[in-house]
C-alpha cells in the first residue's frame, strides 16, 4: 500500500520506512531491496542508511515493531487476544511464516507474547505443569497462526460465503481461547462471548 502523502521529518520518515518494510516482509519476504522499501514509504532510498545505517538494521527494527504491535494486544493479565494472529490482516502470522521460510530461523529478538502468556497461565492456574502450559500455548498458537495464514485459501476452496466465514472465524478464535486457556474478548476487554452453534 503506497502512502497518500510523503512523510516529512525524521520520525515520520522512520515510521514510514518501518511500516513499508513490514508490509513488504508480509507480501514478499526478506529478499526486498532498499529501493523497494523507500518507494513503498515514498522517501529517498538514501534515508534508509541515514536513519537506520543498513537494510539489516531496518529489517531488525521492523521485526521488533511487529512484536511490539502484537504485544499491544495483551490483556491486563498478560493473555493474548484469541484472534491475535489474525489481527492487522494476519501481519504477525504472515511475517513469522515469511521469516522462517526465508531465513530458516527465528529473527525475532524477543518473544513477548509467549512469555507473557506463559506467566498469565501460571498465575491463573497454579496446578498446571510447565509441560501443560507449553502444550496449551503451542496448540492454541498453531491453530491461530494456521487460520491467519490459510483462512482465505480454505474459505475459497470450501466455497465458504462471507457470513459463514465470520461464524467459522469466531469458532476458530473460541477454540484458540479454549485450547490456550485464554479469556475471550469482545474487542476491547476480556469477556465471555458466545461460541457459534453452542449453547
Image (spheres, rainbow, N blue to C red):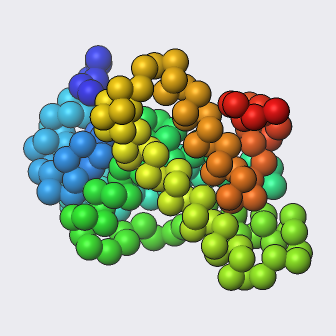
Residue 145 x %, y %: 47, 53
Residue 1 x %, y %: 27, 27
Residue 62 x %, y %: 37, 53
Up-down: is 26 above or below 40? below
From the viewer's perspective, tell me whether residue 58 is left or right of residue 31.
right
From the viewer's perspective, tell me whether residue 52 is left or right of residue 168.
left
Q: Nearer the viewer, residue 29 or 20?
A: 29
Quadrant in which the C terminus is drawn: top right
Q: Nearer the viewer, residue 157 or 28?
A: 157
**Count of residue discs:** 0
Residue 174 x %, y %: 67, 43
Identify the residue shown where x is 27% and y is 49%.
25
Identify the residue shown where x is 78% and y is 64%.
120
From the viewer's perspective, tell me whether residue 52 is left or right of residue 70.
left
Identify the residue shown where x is 68% and y is 82%.
131
Q: Is residue 92 at all visible to an observer of this figure?
A: no
Res. 56 image quadrant: bottom left
Identify the residue shown where x is 28% and y is 57%.
98
Up-down: is 60 above or below 43? below
Q: Nearer the viewer, residue 153 or 62?
A: 153
Q: Is residue 89 at all visible to an observer of this figure?
A: yes
From the viewer's perspective, tell me whether residue 113 is left or right of residue 155.
right
Up-down: is 135 above or below 63? below
Res. 53 image quadrant: bottom left
Amino acid at each position: 500500500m503506497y502512502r497518500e502523502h510523503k512523510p516529512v521529518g525524521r520520525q515520520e520518515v522512520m515510521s514510514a520506512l518501518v511500516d513499508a518494510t513490514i508490509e513488504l516482509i508480509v507480501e514478499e519476504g526478506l529478499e526486498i531491496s532498499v529501493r523497494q522499501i523507500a518507494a513503498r514509504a515514498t522517501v529517498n532510498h538514501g534515508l534508509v542508511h541515514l536513519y537506520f545505517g543498513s537494510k539489516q538494521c531496518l529489517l531488525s527494527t521492523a521485526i521488533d515493531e511487529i512484536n511490539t504491535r502484537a504485544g499491544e494486544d495483551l490483556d491486563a493479565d498478560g493473555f493474548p487476544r484469541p484472534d491475535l494472529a489474525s489481527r492487522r490482516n494476519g501481519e504477525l502470522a504472515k511475517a513469522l511464516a515469511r521469516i522462517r521460510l526465508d531465513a530458516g530461523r527465528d529473527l525475532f529478538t524477543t518473544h513477548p507474547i509467549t512469555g507473557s502468556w506463559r506467566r498469565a497461565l501460571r498465575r491463573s492456574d497454579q496446578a498446571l505443569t510447565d509441560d501443560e502450559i507449553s502444550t496449551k500455548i503451542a496448540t492454541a498458537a498453531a491453530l491461530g497462526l494456521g487460520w491467519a495464514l490459510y483462512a482465505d485459501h480454505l474459505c475459497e476452496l470450501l466455497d465458504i460465503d462471507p457470513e459463514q466465514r465470520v461464524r467459522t472465524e469466531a469458532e476458530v478464535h473460541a477454540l484458540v481461547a479454549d485450547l490456550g486457556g485464554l479469556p475471550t474478548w469482545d474487542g476491547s476487554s476480556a469477556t465471555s462471548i458466545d461460541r457459534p452453534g453452542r449453547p
